[in-house]
Image: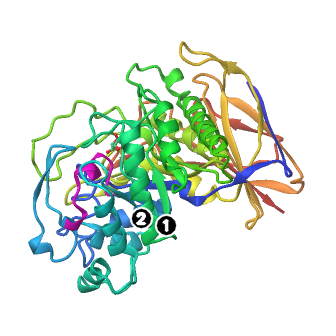
């Protein structure tokens, strides 16, 4: 099959905000305890953080990590996680049915974030708590005033504020699984009042209001419209969450997930702009896609109720999941004019690119690779690309192009990076790339992720899905193997 991708130097979608390559650590399963934190581990640092895990996270180049939840945050007392660790309460954690020891809280997590070269995106509890606790937490983290919470931070050993810039106003508040779930008006009101107090406490922060938990919620769109109507003045972003799965074992259809994601983004951007028009506002609310991933392999897994850090949501990702993650990343890049932040949910052990063994190794799952190459090389402007190729249909998706692609121009590095997934399960694609205005640029690297077996997985001692370099030739076209992910780097000569 033949395909062509055309770009022109003058036609761009927008500048990529690096925070689209964010991720997420929740107090859930083995994400925190026995994930990033394992004091007895051979690689543990002076605070008990695993250095082997930090090294993998640095390799992923994650600019921001959402914390501490997720569903967890809707019952969380942030004060449980500060100060003397011997005095911290152990609590029943109702979101996931486990015991929370509170040995890690924001005091420790912000230090971990520094060690992992990343920033914290903090969520506040608007489920069982409200505006006061949220603004107290903000004062504790960010204020330099001579006032109670800022002084408590100093007393706890932190003279310098943590400087957390991005704050999420609760999590998935439309869900009946959420502690303190709400109607759109209930949430809109409390989010508005919380946002107001938080911006009065620290006007430099950016706030994310909760959109729907996913686009199948019965209140979808109505929720967004009402929440924006209440909060428009004080918030900066609206959140989107979506997980994908291949429970029906239809690989061809599974590879179309990113089409749904693209529609979802465009729908919510339109809702934001509808409220903007209604309010005759000059301000544009952008999007934070702060939970996305493949999640279905671990459904139904059992664990001991009220145990500490049981293995929960430990999806083992296969090769086709990596292709889907690759397609999703191109979709985020292609929507960089509206999506300014996004979080791969999650980062370690829990539906994660990084797996660890208690007391043992840490390794990269299949989905690690497309994420790493997007985050490391996908910086600059996304170009408007015209993809000409054959299309296919499944029962659920019509006229889907076989080639999913994005093109990023990194002016500083004088390089153009093309990401492409060939969705065909049976045919290679001969791709020609026409880059108008980039005369003299030459292909210098072609990285490919391919396995003949769509269900191949990585295990701690057996990395079956890993990137490989394809020899670069003078040929006019490159081959995108059937069901493969590719990154092509062109540099000015
Ligand atoms: O990421 C796992 C869970 O998925 C989060 O806690 C919740 O926000 C979502 O439903």
Task: Answer with mark 1 or mark 2, whichever residue precedes in sequence.
Answer: 2
Task: Pick whichever, 45 or 187, lies toward us.
Answer: 187
Residue 322 rendering spot, x and y as whole percentages: 48, 39
User: Dot 2 lies on which element?
Assistant: helix
Quadrant containing the N terminus in the rendered view: top right
Q: Residue at x 77, y 41 (%)?
A: 385
Residue 24 rendering spot, x and y as whole percentages: 39, 54
Task: Pick whichever, 183 or 345, lies toward us.
Answer: 183
Q: Residue 73 colored magenta?
A: yes
Task: Pick whichever, 448 or 384, lies toward us.
Answer: 384
Say left or right for 417 vs 156: right
Rate crowding at label 1 as few (under 14), some (14 to 19) or many (20 or more) other CA atoms within 10 Å.
some
Location of residue 359 with respect to 290 vertically, above or below: below
Q: Which colour scheme is used?
A: rainbow
Stretch in magenta: 67-79
Q: Is residue 419 visible?
A: yes
Q: Give the quarter of the image for residue 41.
A: bottom left
The residue beneath circle 1 is 205
Q: Give the quarter of the image for residue 362.
A: bottom left
């Amino acid at each position: 099959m033949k395909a062509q991708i055309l770009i022109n130097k003058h036609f761009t979608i927008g500048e990529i905000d690096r925070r689209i390559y964010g991720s997420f650590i929740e107090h859930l399963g083995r994400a925190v305890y026995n994930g990033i934190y394992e004091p007895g581990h051979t690689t543990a640092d002076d605070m008990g953080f695993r250095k082997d895990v930090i090294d993998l996270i640095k390799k992923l180049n994650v600019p921001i990590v959402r914390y501490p939840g997720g569903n967890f945050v809707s019952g969380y007392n942030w004060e449980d996680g500060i100060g003397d660790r011997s005095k911290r309460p152990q609590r029943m954690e109702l979101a996931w049915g486990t015991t929370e020891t509170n040995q890690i809280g924001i005091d420790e997590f912000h230090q971990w974030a520094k060690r992992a070269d990343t920033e914290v995106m903090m969520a506040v509890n608007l489920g069982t708590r409200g505006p006061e606790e949220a603004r107290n937490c903000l004062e504790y983290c960010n204020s330099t005033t001579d006032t109670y919470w800022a002084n408590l931070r100093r007393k706890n050993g932190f003279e310098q504020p943590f400087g957390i810039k991005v704050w999420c106003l609760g999590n998935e508040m439309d869900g009946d699984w959420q502690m303190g779930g709400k109607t759109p008006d209930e949430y809109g009101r409390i989010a508005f009042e919380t946002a107001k107090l938080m911006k009065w406490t620290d006007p430099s922060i950016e706030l994310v209001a909760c959109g729907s938990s996913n686009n199948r919620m019965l209140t979808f769109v109505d929720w967004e419209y009402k929440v924006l109507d209440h909060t428009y003045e004080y918030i900066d972003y609206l959140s989107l969450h979506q997980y994908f799965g291949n429970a029906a074992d239809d690989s061809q259809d599974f590879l179309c997930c990113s089409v749904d994601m693209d529609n979802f983004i465009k729908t919510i951007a339109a809702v934001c702009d509808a409220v903007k028009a209604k309010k005759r506002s000059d301000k544009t609310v952008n999007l934070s896609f702060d939970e996305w991933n493949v999640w279905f392999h671990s459904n139904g897994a059992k664990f001991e109720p009220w145990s500490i850090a049981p293995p929960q949501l430990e999806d083992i990702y296969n090769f086709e999941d990596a292709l889907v993650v690759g397609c999703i990343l191109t979709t985020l890049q292609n929507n960089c004019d509206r999506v300014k932040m996004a979080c791969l949910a999650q980062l370690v052990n829990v539906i994660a690119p990084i797996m660890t063994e208690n007391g043992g190794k840490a390794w990269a799952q299949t989905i690690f690779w497309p994420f790493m190459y997007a985050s490391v090389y996908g910086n600059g402007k996304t170009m408007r690309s015209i993809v000409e190729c054959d299309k296919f249909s499944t029962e659920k998706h019509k006229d889907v192009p076989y080639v999913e692609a994005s093109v990023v121009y990194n002016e500083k590095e004088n390089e153009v990076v093309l990401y492409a997934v060939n969705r065909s399960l049976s045919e290679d694609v001969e791709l020609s790339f026409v880059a108008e205005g980039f005369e003299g640029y030459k292909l210098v690297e072609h990285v490919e992720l391919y396995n003949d077996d769509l269900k191949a997985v990585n295990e701690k001692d057996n990395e079956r899905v890993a990137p490989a370099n394809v020899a670069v030739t003078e040929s006019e076209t490159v081959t995108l193997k059937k069901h493969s992910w590719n990154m092509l780097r062109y540099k000015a000569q």
